[in-house]
Amino acid sequence: DAAEKGGYEHYMRKEIHEQPESLRQTLAGRLDVSAGDVDLDVSFPPGFLADLEEIRIVACGTSYYAGRYAAQLFEELAGVRATVEIASEYEFGAGRTPDRTLVVAVTQSGETADTLGAVRRANAAGARTFAVTNTLGSTVTREVDGTAFIRAGPEIGVAATKTFASQVATLAMLAVAVGRDRGALAAADARSVLKDLQGLPGAVQQVLDEEEQVREAAREYGDGEAFFFVGRALGVPVALEGALKLKEISYDHAEGFAAGELKHGPLALVTPDTPVLAVLTDGARAAETMNNVTEAQTRGAPALGCVSAGDTYDTLDVSFEVPNVGVVEPLVANVYLQLFAYHVANDKGRAIDKPRNLAKSVTVE
Ligand code: AGP
């Protein structure tokens, strides 16, 4: 067991640190930066993408948050309406055209019963289905019309870490491919996104090199009564994922919000004992988010922010620097939140790789 953990005390920390390499695998041979295109080795019937009315993403837990990130990319890069449904809640629903709908199931394991149920309902409705998964030969791959593998390698920790990063990277490539095919994305714009993706493994490594700073922050703020994670735009799914990671492994109360929602209710819970963690990067409407963070600080809450390199917010209690990689900056910020969750949980002596009541793969509905 110790040998398999490669010197790390937990699989989760090992898998967090594997992200530069797993992301390289995800991207390997798939980016054609000079042409502004992507080769994911997937195909659709002629004319299907051009006529596409909607991409509907179905997923659970962390994969659902990867889907929330991706939906924004599909709208921005592929010019197509994109919606995300929690798989257990998904129904094909009224007002939609099955043969102009692509249902994308995002599932690390490919075995999640709720997600398989959603795929079966989509197939029964006559929609085209597609899977984004880590697992070759998994059940989902046999039930969909097409698959893209995220190639993150095996993930043992119950808390998903490297697979989230690879899911978002794969979906970002799919968004570029669909955008190019539909003529919705200019080559120059595609090139800029692909360059950001190329920079992703190195940017994640730079964050990992700052682990000591996160360890100290976890020590200083880890005893909070509750933790609130906020962001806007691409920062919202990262805030939600940051909160899920912390609650899952530390058993602390943690919630993620769209930053603008704080003042519509959650602010009532904010006290000097409720640290606020914010995504303040490109793609996450940082300046507006910071206004909401200030509202929480006025109520005494300590504020920790993941901030784009080059920006400064003097009032933050802790500022984690995120390298400049455009549309994937919030994804890089997420690595700070993974490390924060890990160190808070580790300081409390929690069963990090096997949190109570949870299973890696949830095969019951
Ligand atoms: C994440 O840390 C979780 N353990 C969980 O939410 C997980 O992402 C969810 O069960 C979905 O799993 P899947 O990606 O294998 O479908």
Image (cartoon, grey):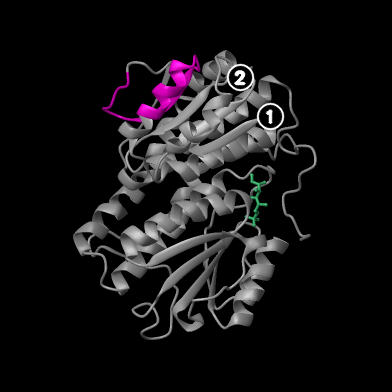
In-image side of 10 versus 179 (left or right): right
In-image side of 102 versus 289 (left or right): right
N-terminal of the pair, mark 2 or mark 1, is: 2
Extreme residue in the bottom direction: 46
Q: Secondary structure at mark 1?
A: helix
Q: Secondary structure at mark 2?
A: loop
Choose top left, top right, bottom left or bottom right for residue 240: top right
Q: Is residue 191 magenta?
A: no
Q: Is residue 296 magenta?
A: yes
Crowd tier of the residue under label 2, counting other residues whose Cα lies within 10 Å: few below 14, some 14–19, many 20 or above: many
Nearer-the-camera pick, 21 or 169: 169
Q: Is residue 137 visible?
A: no
Q: Are marks 2 and 1 in contact (CB under 8 Å)?
A: yes
Q: What stretch of residues is rendered in magenta?
A: 291-313
Nearer-the-camera pick, 157 or 73: 73
Q: Amino acid at mark 1?
A: Ser
Q: Position of residue 303 (x, y in %)?
A: 46, 21
